[in-house]
Amino acid sequence: MAAIYLLIAALIASSHALAAHGAGGGVPVAAAAPLPFPGDLAASGKLRTDPNATVPASMDFGNITAALPAAVLGQTYRHGPQISNVLELDVITGHGETVTCSKAVNSDLFDAVLGGLGQFGVITRARVAVEPAPARARWVRLVYADFAAFSADQERLVAARPDGSHGPWSYVEGAVYLAGRGLAVALKSSGGFFSDADAARVVALAAARNATAVYSIEATLNYAANATPSSVDAAVAAALGDLHFEAGFSFSRDVTYEEFLDRVYGEEEALEKAGLWRVPHPWLNLFVPGSRIADFDRGVFKGILQTATDIAGPLIIYPVNKSKWDAAMSAVTPEGEEEVFYVVSLLFSAVANDVAALEAQNRRILRFCDLAGIGYKAYLAHYDSRGDWVRHFGAKWDRFVQRKDKYDPKKLLSPGQDIFN
């Protein structure tokens, strides 16, 4: 996971110095251009960019195999998933042929491969849109005791304006913290963002409100190196003005953009040193329709997970805009016409040798969603039966099968997912 993440962090570092070296040999170069430019991401981990471009528009960490199933992150509401920002691919199909494809050339293969779970070809090169990297970011976290206020504010932040543009926030995600004896620990493990005093205040808030969970919006407002502190303060204050977080529970840090990108890697290193990283991670990643996210909150965050003895790992939740996804591609989103759906990532770690219990808990969550009629879609799903895969792809299943027969008729690629076996 860290390979391309580290590469992208390196793209930001010393950008003015990099500009003097030119763009050859996979060396990234600083940008001064207003619109995204293409960059070639190779299986070797090199990113060859246009001389005026720096960082991929819609991702901040990942790798070429992990990124192109979809790559859903806090920038997705604005740019779409990573697959919506791919311009061209080189793909080795199940026929053993290397094919260059894009929306203009061999478009059916292009759409099949993006979000296609490795079923149609091996990607050896991806040309992705990149854009100028900001110098710094004002990184904020806003705390809520009420889920309705939390989700309404999240949706307000990601909503497009009438002209299709978005507000000043470049990145919007959110987290859930279960109240109880583990709340302070969970808060303090959030990348060191909350101090001991901050965590104590949030714990007291949860107790005062008799809340079984508290919620946090995480967002960044990026800015240029020549911006004055007062102008950034004013922009942030204006952007927070219409939000309904708990009074006095806005926390912020001012960091370089590279430091913001480094946040996940730093947490991974800390877990590694503590011996808590190289353990099973029975993660559950779901796309939940916006109209049902309150039901999910009541049934899962305020229900099933309240009976868990310990929760190790972040619980992430944030909305994205369906119109930013290309329906022609293989990736699936919740069916229907709703514009907003939520990314819910329950990133459990089996630190207590409890992987079987966590997997059983995941099954309970999915069963709850099924019984409640929540039309979720699993992200990076794994199913044991053909029927489950048919339900997963829904209206896209017939086209998925036709593309498999066209590009990998011998069923050589990614057989371990048991989609066609």
Image (spheres, rainbow, N blue to C red):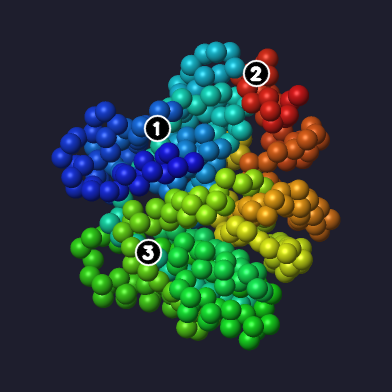
Residue receiving disc 1: 45
Residue at 48% across / 52% down in the picture?
Answer: 273
Distance, label 2 to label 3, CA atoms, is 45 Å
Image position of 134 with respect to 187: above or below: above
Residue type (three-letter) at the residue carrying disc 1: Gly
| Lower position in the chain sequence, tag 2 or tag 3 | 3
Residue type (three-letter) at the residue carrying disc 2: Leu
- Across and down, in percent, residue 417 comes to 69, 31
Kindly check if marks 2 and 3 are in contact, taking CB atoms under 8 A apart as contact: no
- Across and down, in percent, residue 92 comes to 52, 19
Image position of 80 with respect to 184: above or below: above
Along the viewing direction, whichever of 44 and 162 lies nearer the viewer: 44
Residue type (three-letter) at the residue carrying disc 3: Leu
Residue at 15% across / 40% down in the picture?
Answer: 20
Query: How many C-alpha atoms fall within 10 Å of the one at disc 3: few (<14), some, or many (≥20)?
Result: many
Image position of 112 with respect to 157: above or below: above
Distance, label 2 to label 1, CA atoms, is 25 Å
The dot on residue 221 is 3
| Lower position in the chain sequence, tag 2 or tag 1 | 1
Query: How many C-alpha atoms fall within 10 Å of the one at disc 2: few (<14), some, or many (≥20)?
Result: few
